Amino acid sequence: MQLIINENHQQSSEQAAKSFAKFIRQNPKAVLGFATGSTPLLLYAKLIEYYQRKELSFQSITAFNLDEYVGIAADNSHSYAYFMQKNLFSNIDILAQNCHIPNGMSTDLELECERYEHLILANKGIDIQLLGIGRNGHIGFNEPASSFEENTHIVNLSPSTLEANSKYFNNQNMPKKAITMGIASILRAKKIILLAEGDDKAKAIKASLTGEITPTMPASILQSHPNVDVYLDQAAASLL
Ligand code: PGA
C-alpha cells in the first residue's frame, strides 16, 4: 500500500487525476471503476480539465460505478447515474454505452446484481477502482459486517450512512437500500485508489490502514490488496 499525505484535498485530487490520466494515455481501452460522493468531485473536475485542454480522451474507456440506490431512476437528480452524468460523463467524450451503473429500478434486483458482475468480468475486470471511504469504514455501500466474499449485491444502508447522505435528500425519503459492488468485486480490481478528506474520516482511516483486518471495518481489507494508493489530506491523516 502506498500512502500519500498532502496538505489538502485539492493536491490529493490532482495527483490521483494525474495517475488516472497517465494510465488512460497508456491504455486507451482502460476499464475504470468510479465512485460518487463529495470526495471524487475535484478529481473529476481535473479529468474534465484534461479533456477540455485536449490532453486526454475517454472515447475508448469503459466505466463501472460502485453503487446505486434502489428505487431511484437514472433521471432522478438523487441517483448516482445522474451524479455521474452531471459531474463527469456529460463533460467528457466517454461513449454512453460504455458508462455502466447498477440499475436500482430493475424489477429483478438479484438478477441485476448478477448481470452487473458478469458485465465487469466480460470486460476483463476493472483496471483502476476509485474509492472514497465512509465514516464507518464502508467502501462502496459495503457497510460494517459485510462479508469479504460478496460480489455485487443488495444492501440495507446503515444508520450512519443514512445520516451522512440524508443531506442530499433534504432529510426526506432517502432510499434505505442500494445495489453495490461487493468487497470481492472491488478486490478484483488490478489497482485501487482510495481518497479521503476531512477529520470525520480520520478514525476510519486509522482503523482501516493500521488496525486489524475485520469485516467490522470494511476498508481494512484493502491492506490485503497488492496495489493500493491512498491519498489523504492532513485532517484525514491526523490520527495516523
Ligand atoms: P463522501 O462519501 O465522499 O461523500 O464523503 C464517501 C463514502 O461514503 O464512500
Image (cartoon, rainbow, N blue to C red):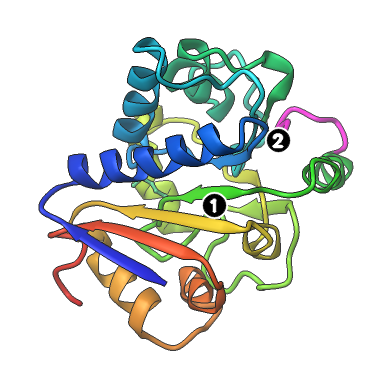
Kindly report the secondary structure that dominates the magenta region of the rendered protein.
loop
**Residue 54 percent across, percent down from the top left:** 41, 12
Coordinates of residue 136 in the picture (x, y in percent): 39, 65
The residue that appears at 45% across and 12% down in the rendered structure is 91
Residue 67 appears in the figure? yes
The quarter of the image holding the C terminus is bottom left
Q: Earlier in the sequence, mark 2 or mark 1?
A: 2
Q: Is residue 132 above or below residue 112?
A: below
Query: Residue 151 placed where, x, y %?
Result: 75, 59
Residue 219 placement (x, y as % from top left): 47, 68
Q: Is residue 57 left or right of residue 16?
A: right
Three-letter code for the amino acid on which mark 2 is drawn: Pro
Q: Residue at x 73, y 72 (%)?
A: 149
Query: Compared with residue 175, is residue 140 higher up or lower down, i.e. above or below?
Result: below
Question: Secondary structure beneath disc 1?
Answer: loop
Q: Is residue 18 magenta?
A: no
Identify the secondary structure beneath mark 2.
loop
Vertical arrangement, residue 82 with respect to residue 128, above or below: above
Q: Tell whether 37 sits left or right of 203.
A: right
Q: Amino acid at mark 1?
A: Gly
Q: Name the residue nearer the viewer: 74 or 123.
A: 123
Instruction: Look at the image and give the residue range highlighted in magenta.
Output: 103-108
Residue occupied by mark 2:
102
Circles 2 and 1 in contact, beta carbons < 8 Å: no
